[in-house]
Image (cartoon, rainbow, N blue to C red):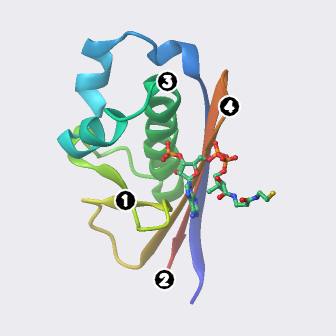
Amino acid sequence: MMILGVGTDIVEVERFKDKPELCKRFLSAKEFEYIDKFRFKEEHVAGFWAAKEALVKALNDRNFNFSEISVLHDENGKPFFEGVNVDGRIHLSISHERKFAVAFVVWEK
Ligand SMILES: CC(C)(COP(=O)(O)OP(=O)(O)OC[C@H]1O[C@@H](n2cnc3c(N)ncnc32)[C@H](O)[C@@H]1OP(=O)(O)O)[C@@H](O)C(=O)NCCC(=O)NCCS
């Protein structure tokens, strides 16, 4: 196994507050479903944006339609990508506070 790429991104949560049109451009239906249960949705939305930007950096490939990729969660809440077709494995970590969200992606093969 070797690491082929890493990517990270930080975003301001405020950018995603009450921005339904922006959200429609990069969130998948499954992500809308996930954020529905949270009161401060924008923190999660910002995390998903950061995750997708970090993915672009890790793969060094801009050729993604963000709304066709989903950040999903396993039974423990750990996030992972669905809809990314690459050779190897993608690891994803997300964190957010009230003002900022960050994500880190590792591409391993
Ligand atoms: C899961 C946990 C690490 C999340 O940390 P947090 O500081 O609450 O929240 P953060 O903003 O840093 O991270 C939130 C993100 O972590 C990710 N996450 C959640 N559960 C996760 C898990 N089991 N593994 C990896 N990532 C996880 C998610 O992507 C989540 O964001 P999202 O729901 O918007 O996608 C934390 O809630 C936890 O369970 N800690 C265990 C340690 C503990 O309980 N300590 C208290 C001892 S007194």
Q: For mark 1, does the 10 Å Cα neighbourhood hold few (<14), some (14 to 19), or many (20 or more) residues?
A: some
- In the picture of the structure, the residue carrying the numbered disc 2 is 109
Query: Is the residue marked 4 within 8 Å of ligand 1, measured from its CB?
Result: yes
- In the picture of the structure, the residue carrying the numbered disc 3 is 40
Q: Amino acid at mark 4?
A: Glu
Q: Please say if 44 is above or below 86.
A: above
- In the picture of the structure, the residue carrying the numbered disc 1 is 81
Q: Earlier in the sequence, mark 2 or mark 1?
A: 1
C-alpha span from label 2 to label 3: 36 Å
Q: Earlier in the sequence, mark 4 or mark 1?
A: 1
Task: Tell me whether circle 2 and circle 3 mark residues in contact (CB < 8 Å).
Answer: no
Q: For mark 2, does the 10 Å Cα neighbourhood hold few (<14), some (14 to 19), or many (20 or more) residues?
A: few
* Left or right relative to 74: residue 27: left
Percent x, y of residue 101: 61, 34
Q: Earlier in the sequence, mark 2 or mark 3?
A: 3
Q: Amino acid at mark 2?
A: Lys
Q: Please say if 11 is above or below 91.
A: above
Toward the viewer: 51 or 85?
51
